[in-house]
Image (tube, rainbow, N blue to C red):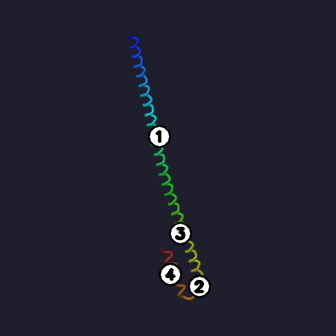
Amino acid sequence: QLQLQLQLQLQLQLQLQLQLQLQLQLQLQLQLQLQLQLQLQLLLQLQLQLLLQLQLLLQLLLLLQLLLQLQLLLLLQLLLQLLLQLLLQNIHSIPTHRALSFQLVYFYIFIIKS
């Protein structure tokens, strides 16, 4: 009977050891799962940062487009002013009607003011 008790005690110890090993494995799995969740969170944060950077880049590109359009408008205005100055300088050499000359002067003044 002593041998039977020893066997039972040994079995209990083995079961306890197995149970402890299983608990340890479960704890390790939970730690791994937590690490994976943290990595996923970091990845999502990186994606958000990338999206914000892309949005900023898009805004910068839109600003650049607006600046280029403004520059084009300024160049066109300058070209118009130069053409009108040239036209006004040579208006007396062109045989035109007097009313047309006044219209060109008013148009020139309108362009300069705007």
For label 2, the SS is: helix
Residue position for label 2: 92
Tell me: residue 40, above or below residue 101. above
Q: Earlier in the sequence, mark 3 or mark 2?
A: 3
- Name the mark on residue 73: 3
Q: Earlier in the sequence, mark 1 or mark 3?
A: 1
For label 3, the SS is: helix
Residue drawn at x 50%, y 81% as measured from the top left: 106
Within 10 Å of the Cα at label 1, are there few (<14), some (14-19), or many (20+) other Cα atoms? few
Give the camera-side residue of 80 and 62: 62
Residue drawn at x 57%, y 72% as measured from the top left: 79
Is residue 19 found left or right of 75 in the rendered image? Answer: left
Distance from Cα at disc 3 to Cα at disc 2:
30 Å
Within 10 Å of the Cα at label 4, are there few (<14), some (14-19), or many (20+) other Cα atoms? few
Distance from Cα at disc 4 to Cα at disc 1:
70 Å
Q: Earlier in the sequence, mark 4 or mark 1?
A: 1
Image quarter hosting the N terminus: top left
Q: Earlier in the sequence, mark 2 or mark 1?
A: 1
Type of amino acid under label 1: Gln
Give the camera-side residue of 73 and 98: 73
For label 4, the SS is: helix
For label 1, the SS is: helix
Q: Earlier in the sequence, mark 4 or mark 3?
A: 3
Q: Nearer the viewer, mark 2 or mark 1?
A: 1
- Residue 57, image x and y in percent? 51, 55
- Name the mark on residue 39: 1
Give the camera-side residue of 113 and 50: 50
Residue position for label 4: 106
